Amino acid sequence: DGGITQSPKYLFRKEGQNVTLSCEQNLNHDAMYWYRQDPGQGLRLIYYSQIVNDFQKGDIAEGYSVSREKKESFPLTVTSAQKNPTAFYLCATSRDRVTEAFFGQGTRLTVV
Amino acid sequence: AQKITQTQPGMFVQEKEAVTLDCTYDTSDPSYGLFWYKQPSSGEMIFLIYQGSYDQQNATEGRYSLNFQKARKSANLVISASQLGDSAMYFCAMRESRERRSQGNLIFGKGTKLSVKP
């Protein structure tokens, strides 16, 4: 099955902990993105990567980190420096900078 | 300044009727793409329709059509013959091809919540 897999679907984090959200794709797309969505809001870009071993900060990168060691994988780490991490996180991929992006099912992160 | 504006936080439509969801955008890039996504309560983002800035005709995909008015910088989504399953959040988004700062990233509006009444 071609697609984007995000895991886990639900994640609970204690304050002060780092957590890593997984995003894997088998669409052979070069570009991958991480978005954050807060209740009743649109999506805001955290990080993006247009090619392996390269990534760029988006609009709200503070408190997050990423890596892109393989084309298929773009994990997002939410660090303890992120003051308000409770949100819905969406990973996306696209073939290029023009055509549509495809999204994973999302991870709902809650700080307890 | 907001690049994508969706002025309708919520909309109601009767089943089987048509509905228009508004979207205006702001860009100085001559080459851009406009997208509409649907987000049901489950959370996944479903791509619906795409319109390129150089496309001469309005895009259509089944019951979805995009009313593209370039001079007014609007890209409204029209859903014909609404169904109960159309109840969801709808997001308008834009990609700028040549704007270096955005580098082709998708920029989203805040969304419109559509409720279809039986």
Image: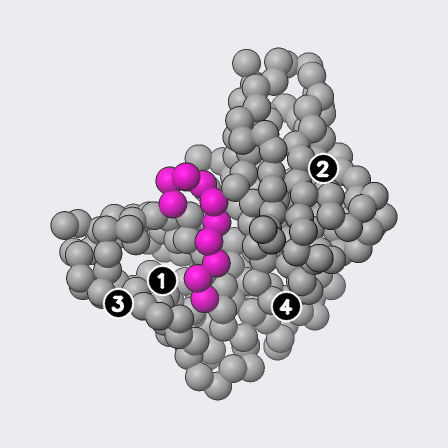
Circle 3: element type: loop
Magenta-colored span: B40-49
Name which residue type carries label 3. Answer: Ser
Chain-order first, disc 1 or disc 3: 1
Instruction: Say which of B1 and B95 sits in front.
Output: B95
**Residue beneath disc 4:** A98
Chain at tag 2 = A
Secondary structure, mark 2, is loop
Check whether the beta carbons of the residues at disc 4 and disc 3 lie within 8 A of each other. no
Task: Identify the residue position indicated by label 1 in the image.
Answer: B22
Whether B27 is drawn above or below B37: the answer is below
Label 2 to label 4: alpha-carbon separation: 23 Å
Q: Residue at x 73, y 48 (%)?
A: A72
* Residue A112 lies in quadrant: top right
Percent of width and height locating residue A88: 52, 34
Q: Nearer the viewer, residue A100 or B74?
A: A100
Q: Residue at x 37, y 40 (%)?
A: B41
The residue labelled by disc 2 is: A75
Q: Secondary structure at mark 4?
A: loop
Label 1 and label 3: CA atoms lie apart by 15 Å
Disc 3 marks which residue? Answer: B80
Lateral position of residue B99 relative to residue B56, left or right: right
SS label for mark 1 = loop
Image point (69%, 28%), residue name: A20
Disc 4: CA contacts within 10 A as few (<14), some (14-19) or many (>=20): many
